[in-house]
Amino acid sequence: MAKSPEEHPQKAFGWAARDPSGTLSPFHFSRRENGDEDVTVKILYCGVCHSDLHSVKNEWGITRYPIVPGHEIVGIVIQLGNNVKKFKMGDRVGVGVLVGSCKTCETCQQDLENYCPSMIFTYNSTSQDGTRTYGGYSDIVVVDQRYVLRIPDNLPSDAAAPLLCAGITVYSPMKYYGMTEPGKHLGVAGLGGLGHVAVKFGKAFGLKVTVISTSPNKEDEAINKLGADSFLVSTNPEKVQAALGTMDYIIDTVSAIHSLAPLLAMLKLNGKLITVGLPDKPLELPIFPLVMGRKLIGGSDIGGIKETQEMLDFCAKHNITADIELIQMDYINTAMKRLSKSDVKYRFVIDVANSLSQ
Ligand code: NAP
Ligand code: ZN
């Protein structure tokens, strides 16, 4: 039986949702003792992913309350286990979506812990000791060193935080599905947290990038700030018509139910549509455009720890960070409402260390 959160020795404090209203409020709990393989991280910043919103509202039907969300964590190492060689006190580190896995299965052996059947999520999951995991909208977190990332020196802590989920979630499929050939045309559907980082990766890989969006007010920035080559509003039939058959790849980051038909139609022969968004209901699969153009649909779930480090180092080299709106902890319920309306450019990040007061 799961232990109550009060049984651990390290006191912790954060914000939790108690029911499907998703409203977050202060929450006292505890973290496990720092074991031999563990590091304790003082959390500085935590990004606000749409998965946090799906989760606090129980949109996927798997939430157990109370839930402390947050899996885009950057912080400082304040405690080290005896066996920790990878980090030292004061190091700037990151924690993403996963904090544990079996370490022995085929996927773990291949550095694909993100597909391990026993993967432990940073929040709303059960730890090896049977207790619940709580995420980064909190003051400290205790994590096995294997799942802790090093933040490269030239990346700012706040704008790097979203890379731990949004960044790796788009980087990993772009690499795996070969969406990196310079000169090819990438469509990015949904210009939110994931989408805007996908635009930056696309440009860093030398692709032509078109944003496919429902928000006309994002056009100017998409082109002039994020570096997209073009922008099309998916509700404008003329724009969609002009884009048919023009794209080699599309990465679909949309968080809600939407039609795949126009996206498939925008692909060239042999085009690839890779979906990473996680709407709460199944999408319809239009077979004809798929079959007639020998097209491929794939999915992808975050990335392994090794690849996440590779992605952070790639970001350091290419000066890629998220465009963020830094918020105080007590703004989180307003931020969640705005996120539900796609009203953020492009990621809220909570200034945890400076605004989490008991
Ligand atoms: P986000 O910041 O809210 O961005 C999602 C974007 O989708 C919005 O900005 C909006 O872009 C577009 N959108 C929203 N509602 C729409 C609708 N009804 N029709 C068409 N477009 C719509 O969310 P995010 O944090 O990037 O996450 C996106 C999705 O990926 C979520 O479902 C999240 O749970 C999932 N996710 C998956 C993984 C994974 O490993 N696979 C990891 C992280 C997140 P425009 O304004 O440009 O239209
Ligand atoms: Zn996320």
Image (spheres, rainbow, N blue to C red):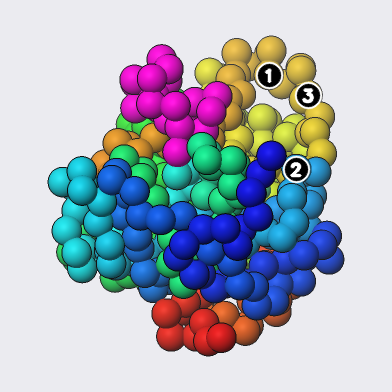
For label 1, the residue is 290
Residue 282, given in percent of the width and then of the height, sits at: 80, 33
Helix, strand or loop for disc 1: helix
> Mark 1 near mark 3, Cβ–Cβ under 8 Å?
yes
| Residue 79 visible in this rendered orientation of the protein | yes
Residue linked to disc 3: 286
Of the 4 image quadrants, the one containing the C terminus is bottom right
211 shown above or below 60: below
Residue 231 included in the magenta stretch of the image: no
Q: Amino acid at mark 1?
A: Leu
**Place of residue 354 in the rendered image (x, y in percent of width and height, measured from the top left):** 43, 85
Left or right: where 152 falls relative to 42: left
Kindly identify which numbered label has been placed on residue 62.
2
In the rendered view, tell whether residue 151 sits above or below residue 252. Answer: below
Q: Which residues are magenta?
A: 100-119
Lower sequence index among marks 1 and 2: 2
